[in-house]
Image (cartoon, coloured by chain):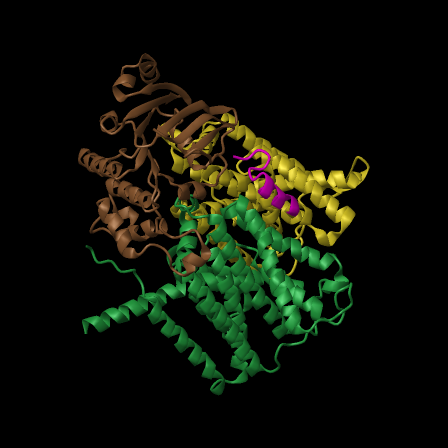
Chain colours: A brown, B green, C yellow
Amino acid sequence: MAKLLEVQGITKKFGGLVAINDLSFHLEEGEVLGLMGPNGSGKTTIFNIIMGDFLPNSGRILFKGEDITHYPTFKRVKMGITRTYQVPRPFRELPIIEDIRISTIPDSIMGSLRGEGTHIDEIKEIAEDVGLGGRFSKYPHELTMGDLRRVELAKTLATNPKIILLDEIFAGLTVAEIEEIDKLLRRKMEEGLDFVVVSHDLKALAPLVDRVVVIHFGQFIAEGSFDQIVNDEKVKAAYFG
Amino acid sequence: MERYSKVGITSIKLLRWWLIGIAVMFVLPLFLPISVLRVAIMASYLAIFAMSWDMMSGYTGYVSFGHPFLIGVAGYATAMWSHQSGFQPPHIILPLFATIPLAIAASVGAGMLLFLPSMRTRGPYFSLVSLAFMMIIYRLVIAIRPDMTGGDRGLPDLPPVVAGPVPNYYLAIGLMFAVGIGLWYVTRSDVGSVLKAIRMDEDVVEASGISTYRFKRFAFILSALTAGIGGAFYTHYLQSISPRRTFGAIFLLEIIISTVIGGMGTIVGSIFGGFFLTFTLEYLRPYLLGAWRFLTYSLVALFIVLYRPRGLYGMGEDIARWVARRREGA
Amino acid sequence: MERILIFGFLLSGLYALIAMGFTMIYGLGRVLNLAHAGYVMVAGYMFYWALQVLHLPMGVAFLIAIATSTGLALATYMGFVRRFLHNPTVVFVSTFILALILDYSMVLFFHTENINVWPIVRGVTEVFGTRVPLNLVAALIASWACIAGVLLFMRKTHIGRAMRALAIDRKGAIISGINPERVNLITWGLSGALAGVAGVFYASYTYLVPPMWVFPLVMSFAIVIIGGLGSIGGTIIGAHIVGLMETTTTLAIDERLRGVFAMVIMIVVVVVRPKGLFGR
């Protein structure tokens, strides 16, 4: 299987703090990768580096074999990598249908002036698809956490991605909401999307992932199937001390 | 499927308002005395400056406290090249159809200079830097080569573009509507949507696959371009330029307050704000002494910034919506 | 040369005092209070009014000035900043407008002529061979006393440590039981008081005129940006850099270029190293 996304030897320091320490892992085409680790182990940081919010001190990020380590964020998104945020970041002043539409506006001045973005009907379809029907004109402060997560997903889907990095997509959801998001993700997986999923909710994570990478203090600890790593000694030590 | 329509009035209807506005302004000279026309000319130029400020500060959220820097660069460029003393070397005076485009190009260049720090900083840092630009050029114009810039007196006796109040009135409102419709069209398009989103959360816009650099640069260029147009023509209307009037705090305040009262992030609101401010300043002059007027405007502006950010434009929208609802009910 | 160094040093202390309150507010809530320099101005006017119009004793005038500036700062916070802490642009624009309101209010009450304030300490002295007004020396002593006071406060007292904790990690501090509202009030009040002291000395160093707040405001910006927003130590160092540059420009280069070099350095810092020397 081809390696879609590769993290090679990434190290990131913030002042004196080593957030990521020589971390390497990869995502293969057609698989869902789980990224686990205790609080503060660097999961969000590595997502930020993959997306280009920070530059690493050393190491490379490869996407479909191309070295994207120094590419600006928007370029990576256009190539097909997107992410959701641990705490949803909707545009406060926009109704969610407009919010999703922003993701479909072309990256060009002339194109935007001519209105070459996606037609509103297609955007409504995306919103319906993630389960936001009947709430198109609502503002973020009027929505439940479950719906806000759906908006995040809709925004990523609107960019036609190849990979979505999901940062704690299940956090703050009711059991029912988790089930619905799970069904949605599975449907997308069948449609060919690949994910890297970060989650504390092991029950939600387990059925979704093909493989898991565990990190702690920004370092690689273990890798394997869900059952394998759950029984791994090093992983248990990291979580339980 | 749920029916959804964008809130607010559709573009076609608003175009109708533009045409009505142009028609009304066009025929006013037939009814109004020259003195009123003169005030209207000043108001038109203030409206142009306010709209160009709104383009940058109201939309991208990069609030600039240095807009007079852009305006002044254009004003001084056209003044220096068209003035008696000329520009040394070479010692030539250029005609206006040459100096004005040069001035506008200069202000676009100045806008790019201002854009540079915006790439590295945001929010209040950027605002401070823009203020610094304005203060620096204020000092430089006075201290460096006062033989060219006129020092702290400035440059008087500049040639006008057209002579007489009525031709200048048509020139002023012509420019105002040209700038207004142009900026309005841009901000109504997806470019405006992106810019507003940038103001709300720049990182998320970048994460949506849009180069915020590209869009911000466009906004800055447009803002500088329109500021330059206003600055160059205004300088020739006043037929003089001076550092205190151009780079002093009062001018900056008039621009900001016009936009704020009219409604930031609306473009059209700036026209309302500019006219409102100019006319009330003029006609309240005998009734309210200097500081009271500015104090009142500042209080009004404060109230609007905090509680009614859509300003006069927002009030206009609310009224229009109310009228539409009543018509539907009837 | 000595004149430049000595006057520069004296001025820097005063600048540090003015910029101190400014940086404290930013360090705490990431908001810029542009009305801060306005408080400095109002304190100066109040001191003049109490001392030279009402003929109250100097100590009382001092207290009135500081009380006014502290009151204004608290009123600003409780009046509207508190409600808009999540929206720094609104705070920025509205405090700027507030500074204007204070400016125009001073014009209404005191008109636009320059007013000379009696020096707090009269006389001249010699420092390393240069004649220096004692008032300026007093300003320096007062400035350093306040700065030392603030530093001690931040290090030793419970509230001071709470302020630092909130500045470093807001959520963590709140979870530890620190009451953010109380700390906010104290910080704002303190910054107002510092502005008051600065205002009294600044007014007697220069003269009173309503637009007088603009230059100290801009200098404060340059100072805190160069030194690093949120860092008290950075403010002190930044104040000295700016103060010395300012004095060099006015005494040695060209009076009309006042402030230009500070501005240029500020722009360079913002572009090259936005955090400044010690900022967060």
Pinpoint residue B18: horizontal percent, then vertical percent.
40, 73
Q: Which residues are magenta?
A: C264-280
Q: Is residue A134 left or right of residue B62?
A: left
Residue farthest along the top direction in this orientation:
A233
Q: State the residue in front, A138 or C9.
A: A138
Q: State the residue in front, A123 or C128.
A: A123
Q: Is residue C135 left or right of residue A216?
A: right
Q: State the residue in front, C211 or B164.
A: B164
Pinpoint residue C70: horizontal percent, then vertical percent.
50, 44
- Asked whether residue A41 is in view, the answer is yes
Is B122 placed above or below C146 here?
A: below
Q: How many marks?
A: 0
Q: State the residue in front, A17 or B47.
A: A17
- Give yes or no for residue C274 being in the magenta stretch: yes
- The quarter of the picture where the N terminus of chain B appears is bottom left
- Give yes or no for residue C184 being in the magenta stretch: no
